[in-house]
Amino acid sequence: MNSDHAEAVLGILTSQRAHRDFLPDAIPETDIEKILTAATHAPSAENSQPWEFIVVTDDKLRAALGELMQRAWDGGGRDASRDVLSAGVFADVDRGLTGGIASAPVMILCCADLNRTRKETVGSSLFPAVQNLLVAATALGYGSALTTIATVFTHELRNLLGFPESVVPVALVPLGRPARKMGLPRRDPAGERTHQNGW
């Protein structure tokens, strides 16, 4: 890998951030395929590759997913987050979960098939794939966000999208062109969170 390529990859990794407002523009199938191909090149426990992705573009289904997210937010998520998030982030999340995320032209439900992995390794197998998905979306100019709040309604998600009992939802990722330009994500310097040869 040459240094220009490495810098480009690092630039994408450090510019990826959560988007919760989207333009209605459709996403070409070829771009969705590229994003999901990147997702499936993530590491997984024992190389089990237990991921299953449900790509939702239907207007009624996306609206129903948005309603589930808002119901979870109104039913306790908002109160649990109010004192944890800064005022600005809280307002952004609130806007997203009360309509902004539902405006995404594509929603991808990221699931794990328990026939291919143990329950204990779902997180270590699925979240790297979700991260690859988010980074690939950023590389192609799309906004996205890692959300998990809808998964509290696993039964409703299963009824809505028809996945089998052996499959569990892990994250719901909205995908689309960002409705507004956002700067780089704010992060504490890595050095402030790094310890060498012990704490």
Image (cartoon, rainbow, N blue to C red):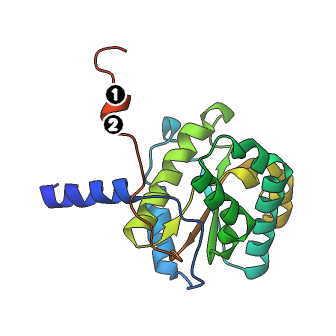
Label 1 environment density (alpha carbons within 10 Å; few <14, some 14–19, many ≥20): few
Quarter of the picture containing the N terminus is bottom left
Q: Please provide percent x and percent y for residue 128.
A: 49, 46
- The reply to whether discs 1 and 2 touch (Cβ–Cβ < 8 Å) is yes
Q: Which residue is mark 1?
A: 194
How many numbered marks have been drawn onto this rendered protein structure?
2
- Tell me the quarter of the picture where residue 4 sits: bottom left
CA gap, disc 1 and disc 2: 6 Å
At which x and y percent is residue 2?
13, 56
Residue 182 visible here: yes
**Which residue is more in the foreground, 63 or 31?**
63
Kind of residue at badge 1: Thr
Judge left or right: residue 110 versus residue 142: right
Residue occupying the far front of the picture: 87
Please say if 183 is above or below 177: above
Residue at 29 percent of width and 15 percent of height = 197
Rendered residue at 44%/49% (across/down): 42
Can the viewer see residue 164?
A: no
Residue 137 marker: none
Mark on residue 190? 2
Q: Residue at x 54, y 38 (%)?
A: 124
Q: Residue at x 65, y 48 (%)?
A: 112
